[in-house]
Image: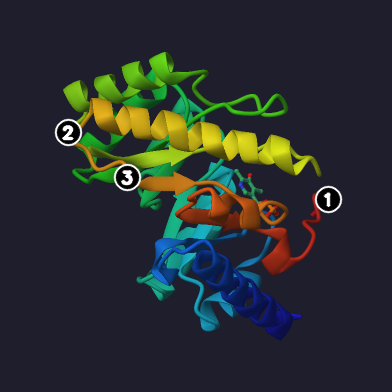
Amino acid sequence: MQNLIGKKFLDVQNDVNECAKNAGRAQNDVKLMAVSKFHSIEEIESAIKFGANLFGENRVQEAVEKFSVLLQKYPKINLHLIGSLQRNKVKDIVKIASCIESVDRIDLICEIEKQCAKIERKIDILYELHTAEESKSGFANYDELFSAVKYTVDNCAHIVPKGFMTMAAFTNDEALIKKSFVQLKTVGKKIQDAFPNLLLNEYSMGMSNDYKIAIQEGSTIVRIGTAIFGERNYDK
Ligand SMILES: *Cc1c(COP(=O)(O)O)cnc(C)c1O
């Protein structure tokens, strides 16, 4: 079981490198995030032993339980939060995550700034854009995103904006999936042009079922759970 995870991680890593190459991109252009939600510390450790160093979790309590332990033991790994975040959970997550990818409203940005200021640390964020019907989260369009970035620049000394994140529709329709990723790139580039003093070059897009398309469309972080750890057991 444990070694199987290591093997799958290496398989996915090779495939990500291959896709990057085929898309005419440098290999280290695309980072592989192992999405470890619903998986145990032991399972995560077996991925670490095979070289995984970036992890994603979507629930704060679960992230804290596992990664307060793991980050002590493996100080070189990084954790990103990728799930919707409530204000009252911000103070716990900013202590362990290096990046919050699922920033989708200004009151959240405000709270992240407040909690990071308290503990005197800086945190990276990505702005989530809503690009598919199924998903409920994310800024709706360019104007909303612009306001959020402007708010961050004007008010948040402890937040470092790094780029954008989205979730495509869960479908076999490749054209529809591609549309989400193209939309994120298009809106993201327009925001970058509007804020030349920021470096907004991270595009977190692509999951187990659609990362190949995402890499073709310019993803810099692919978020892979199932293809590395197997199916999630939601009853646990
Ligand atoms: C769970 C999750 C993933 C990983 O999904 P898989 O299909 O298991 O690869 C990626 N991104 C987000 C935001 C998630 O919540």
Residue assigned mark 1:
235
Reading the image, the residue beneath label 3 is 124
Amino acid carrying label 3: it is Asp
Residue 18 in picture, x, y percent from top left? 57, 72
Query: Badge 1 local density, few (<14 within 10 Å), some, or many (20+)?
Result: few
Q: Position of residue 15 (x, y in %)?
A: 62, 72
Q: CA distance from mark 3 to mark 1?
A: 32 Å
Answer yes or no: is residue 221 visible: yes
Q: Residue at x 43, y 28 (%)?
A: 187
Q: CA distance from mark 2 to mark 1?
A: 41 Å
Left or right placement of residue 15 versus residue 100 in this view: right
Nearer the observer, 199 or 89? 199
Dot 3: what SS? strand
Q: Are marks 2 and 1 in contact (CB under 8 Å)?
A: no
Label 1: which secondary element: loop
- Of the numbered discs 2 and 1, the one sitting upstream in the chain is 2
